[in-house]
Image: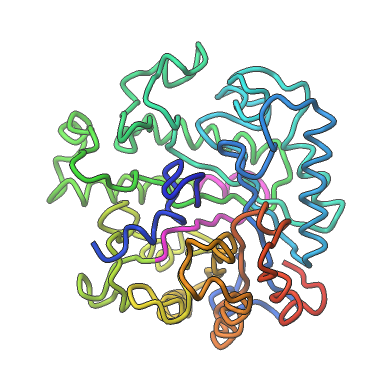
Amino acid sequence: MRGISRRGFGAAALGAASWLLGAGAGAGRGAPAGRELRGMWLATVANLDWPSRPGLDRATQQRELVGLLDAAVRRRLNAVFFQVRPTADALWPSPYEPWAQVLTGVQGRDPGWDPLDFAVREAHRRGLALHGWFNPYRIANHADPGRLVPGHPARRHPGWVVPYAGKLYYNPGLPEVRRFVQDAMLDAVRRYPLDGVHFDDYFYPYPVAGQGFGDDAAYEEYGGEFAGRGDWRRDNVNLLIREMHERLAGVGRQVPFGVSPFAVWRNSATDPHGSRTEAGVQAYDDLYADTRRWVREGWVDSIVPQVYWPLGFAAADYAELVAWWARTVAGTRVALYIGEALYKAGPSAQPAAWQDPAELSRHLTFAARHPQVAGHVYFSTKDVVKDPLGALARVVKDHYGGPARP
């Protein structure tokens, strides 16, 4: 997901371009008639979309949140992916982790209300599905454990923590970490009527040249049966995905599970099963996320690849990636939704294709050729609201003539 700056807070969606060149039954066959997911990502990390700044009073925060949900309705969207665990903290009263800093400006400070409960109720009142969006392993967008609130799990268990590229992460190679982050996320699922659970694209962090991820001790303890560290790391992430899917099946109601990965699994030059792309980052090799396997094994109910490039882009053509993902989900029960880079439409720093308000509309026209595509999700909510180039308005005019059930 996109961050504040070019890579911002470790966010792949925006950073992906700079790296280049160096749910349900029958979902894999497309959505049933009259149904289509039209979603938006509502990011809270670093107050990207909401709240507009930390420390606002309860009434102002609620008014802002309702305004964003109303904007989704005006744009004829029907689903919101609400980031409720941005940095190993929570937008609900979690027994596992502290209150999120984005609310009050102080991690661990009770805001005096329950944002997740409010968001679910207000979304459902408007006919919007509300998916809880979780980041499993990111602890902080800085590298100082002393800045975490006293009693933070990362301070109680310093052996769980790996500093990397100026940030702090939980170590995916530790079984106790995997269990803890699952428990922390499942708490929200058990307490609120969420319409789904959603992970973004951050598993092992995006690689930074000249820096190694410090998991030597964990690899020495747990990696002996693997041919190499890469296979072990992929297995760690596979276990997170598979176990989360299995544990969601045990909560007593159906809760679809989805992931929005970096769109390039592998380039075809690396693997003949890969896409005809030339991406400098490959999810399988660099993030240790075997996204293709998750689909084929049925460990996810939906996949939302972040296809954040225009039609005809040489290194990663939107058309090639949508077609590749359509083939990947074909014959499975995994729903395919396409992540769309609404935030790129208009800024002068973006390539010429993004200066055309019709580019996103052409994306939906192309995707409609593939019956496996069951919807689209837009990043991010503030761009849904402002839509400076009119790109989303053009999508609504051309493709969203009436309401649709998610």
Left or right position of 78 against 333:
right
Which color scheme does this rendered protein use? Answer: rainbow
Q: What main secondary structure does the magenta stretch of the protein show?
A: loop
Q: Residue at x 63, y 23 (%)?
A: 105
Q: Residue at x 41, y 59 (%)?
A: 262
State the quadrant of the C terminus: bottom right
Task: Name the spot of residue 11 as percent of width and height, x first.
Answer: 45, 48
Left or right position of 273 against 264:
left
Q: Residue furthest top?
A: 150
**Relative to 272, does residue 227 appear above or below in the rendering?**
above
Task: Name the spot of residue 206 as percent of width and height, x first.
Answer: 33, 48
Q: Residue furthest bottom?
A: 369
Q: Residue at x 43, y 66 (%)?
A: 295
Front-most of residues 124 and 163: 163
Front-most of residues 376 and 20: 20
Q: Residue furthest front?
A: 348
Residue 248 magenta-highlighted? yes
Question: In the rendered image, which quarter is residue 301 located in?
Answer: bottom right
Residue 198 magenta-highlighted? no
Left or right position of 49 against 276:
right
Q: Residue at x 33, y 73 (%)?
A: 315
Task: Name the spot of residue 372 as percent of width and height, x first.
Answer: 55, 79
Q: How many marks?
A: 0
In the image, the segment drawn in magenta is 246-263
Task: Name the spot of residue 228 as percent of width and height, x first.
Answer: 14, 49
Left or right position of 34 against 152:
right
